[in-house]
Amino acid sequence: MNSNPLPARVVLLRPRNADNLGAVARAMKNFGLTDWVVVSPNPKLLEVPGMHRLAVKAGELLESVRRVDTFEEAVADCTWVVGTTSRALEGRRRLSPAEVAKEAVARGERFALVFGDERSGLTNEDCAQCHALSVIPTGDEQPSLNLSQAVLVYAYELHQARHAAASPAPTAQLADDALLRTVRGAAEEALSAAGFLRDGRSGFDALFGTLLRAHPTKKEAGLWTSAFKAVAKALGRGSTGPQTP
């Protein structure tokens, strides 16, 4: 049995109830997850004493949780970002928790599971920043889950998938979210210069979604960025700065 922590990061966007953080810590401890980040403008959110009441035998996770101000900062070093939501977005796959776990274990690199706030979950803008989406199938009479319950479902599936098969060593480092955002910006600049986006961003998310589904390596992402920058420059819209091959 592999004793190394699974390279999974739990990202909580704008949590409202500090007590839930204690329950989330316990759920993570149950199945060996250790990396988590809270995206919140409230600097005192993690100072509520009551969190320890629900974090049974998981108090050390409450000490290690990080608070950041933006979604982008929370996932910048993750090669795969999966939003947990019942929403659908064109160009994004919708996976079950088991499918997410199986793919995450196969990839073997840092990825993020993103959860929205307890009241309304992820927004459309949040979903647009994710590489894929996932939903927990539930009964029609009560479709919503408590935040810690949702984390527990994914943590369990990751635990099961990890121990069902050995994780293969990746042949090349995959592009992280920060690099994928660079590719996206270069693509928007080039396609705008070419007139493809003259009617707004209609269709761009679906188009870029095909690149996300390909899981490009760092080298491939660099090549795509260089190609888009070259197109934009040729059309008179690109920057004159150095390009990364």
Image (tube, grey):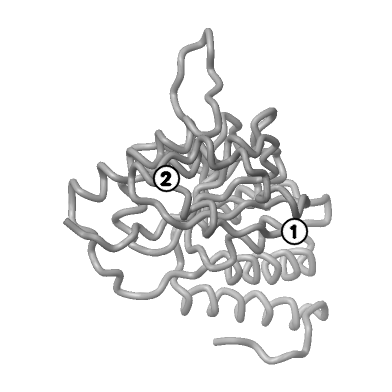
Where is residue 37? Give x, y as percent. Answer: 58, 55
Q: Secondary structure at mark 1?
A: loop
Where is residue 237? Give x, y as percent. Answer: 82, 77
**Residue at x 70% of width, y 47% of height:** 45
Task: From this view, report whether residue 14 is shown above or below residue 229.
Answer: above
**Residue at x 77% of width, y 56% of height:** 197
Horizontally, residue 103 falls left or right of residue 226, namely left
Q: Residues within 10 Å of mark 1 (few under 14, many from 20)?
A: some
Q: Quadrant of the C terminus?
A: bottom right
Where is residue 136? Give x, y as percent. Answer: 45, 29
Q: Quadrant of the N terminus?
A: bottom left
In the rendered image, which residue does mark 1 sit on? 196
> Which amino acid, mark 1?
Phe
Q: Nearer the viewer, mark 2 or mark 1?
A: 2
Where is residue 23? Give x, y as percent. Answer: 50, 36
Name the residue nearer the viewer: 179 or 22.
22
**Residue at x 64% of width, y 88% of height:** 243
Q: How many marks?
A: 2
Task: From this view, report whether residue 113 is shown above or below residue 146.
Answer: below
C-alpha span from label 2 to label 1? 45 Å
Q: Which mark is residue 28?
A: 2
Task: From this view, report whether residue 71 is shown above or below residue 109.
Answer: above
- For marks 2 and 1, the one nearer the N-term is 2
> Which amino acid, mark 2?
Met
Q: Residues within 10 Å of mark 2 (few under 14, many from 20)?
A: many
Q: Secondary structure at mark 2?
A: helix
**Residue at x 52% of width, y 59% of height:** 64
